[in-house]
Image: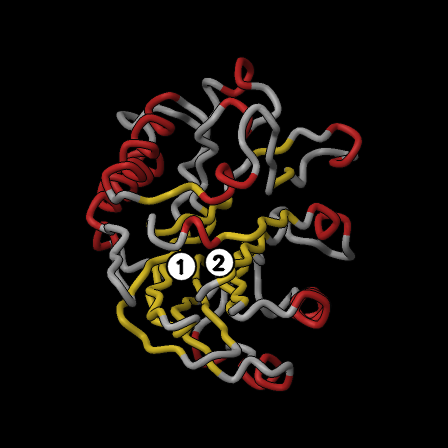
Amino acid sequence: MPFSIATWNINSVRLRMPLIEQFVSRYRPDVLCLQETKCPDDLFPLKALRKLGYAHIEISGQKGYHGVATISLRPLEIVEKRDFCTMGDCRHLAANVEAGGHKILVHNFYVPAGGDEPDPAINPKFRHKLDFVAEMHGVPAMSGEAAASILVGDLNIAPLEADVWSHRQLLNVVSHTPIETESFEAMRRAGNWVDLMRQAIPEPERIYTWWSYRAKDWEASNRGRRLDHVWSSANIAPKLSSIEVLKEARGWERPSDHVPVIARFDLD
């Protein structure tokens, strides 16, 4: 039974509704996890999304900052909206969805960016990011005979050398510093999560999901980073049929600086 899930840091759900409409009309994922929605719950565009066929919607938003939303063609059962680091930020949402005889727990994350200075002693934003990732050690990949887990989102860390345009030049740049990448991979392994993007597209092939707005010509310079991730519990990792990184979306009108990533599964 085919099942697809997409993740996308949309950078304002209301501003970029036309792009969401374009994306879901063409690709029709069963579940779409959005981050950085920048929208309080009472202003979330529920009607527009339901008109597109996404009748099942769970949101955790706040005015102007952060925010995550999980929208689905299939029924969703909300499990948790966790306040990581007790900051009051809307950065996590977990919901169950049924697919192929499995109850799949879908975690939707928006990890803090961390500011510009990679020193937790002088940059509280970077300290917060490290603390957030440390707390994610408590999010295991739950699985069973008829249960599985998927974790997606803008995790704001590019862990591998092939996840950035220049490993050497970005070693002291937030998102690829050793303190981040080592903590990130330790957290993933501690939770028994499988990095599905690298399962489908092994190193040394490069994967980017983000290109800065600061670049005059993002496509020509191609100085990207893989900040968006798709993980799963080990029991459904062999069911992954494809990963698609929709690079063309970075060139759409008034785009996000992130692009959608779609994971497709063949579930029994």
Counting residues from the start of the chain, the first of labels 1 and 2 encountered is 2
Please indicate, yes or no, whether residue 14 appears anywhere in the rendered image. Answer: yes
Which residue is depicted at the point 50% across and 37% down? Answer: 198
Tell me where residue 227 appears, x and y as whole percent. Answer: 51, 40
* Residue linked to disc 2: 35
Q: How many marks?
A: 2
Residue designated by label 1: 108
In the picture, measured across the screen, residue 137 lies left or right of residue 7, that is: left
Q: x, y (%) of residue 83? A: 25, 59
Q: Are marks 1 and 2 in contact (CB under 8 Å)?
A: yes
> Does residue 240 sit above or below 64 in this rendering?
above
Residue occupying the point 57% across, 23% down: 204
Does dot 1 land on a helix, a strand or a loop?
A: strand
Residue at the outermost front position: 268
> Which residue occupies 71% across, 48% down?
250
Q: Is residue 174 visible?
A: no
Q: Nearer the viewer, residue 13 or 178?
A: 178
Q: Within the image, what quadrant is residue 42 found in?
A: bottom left
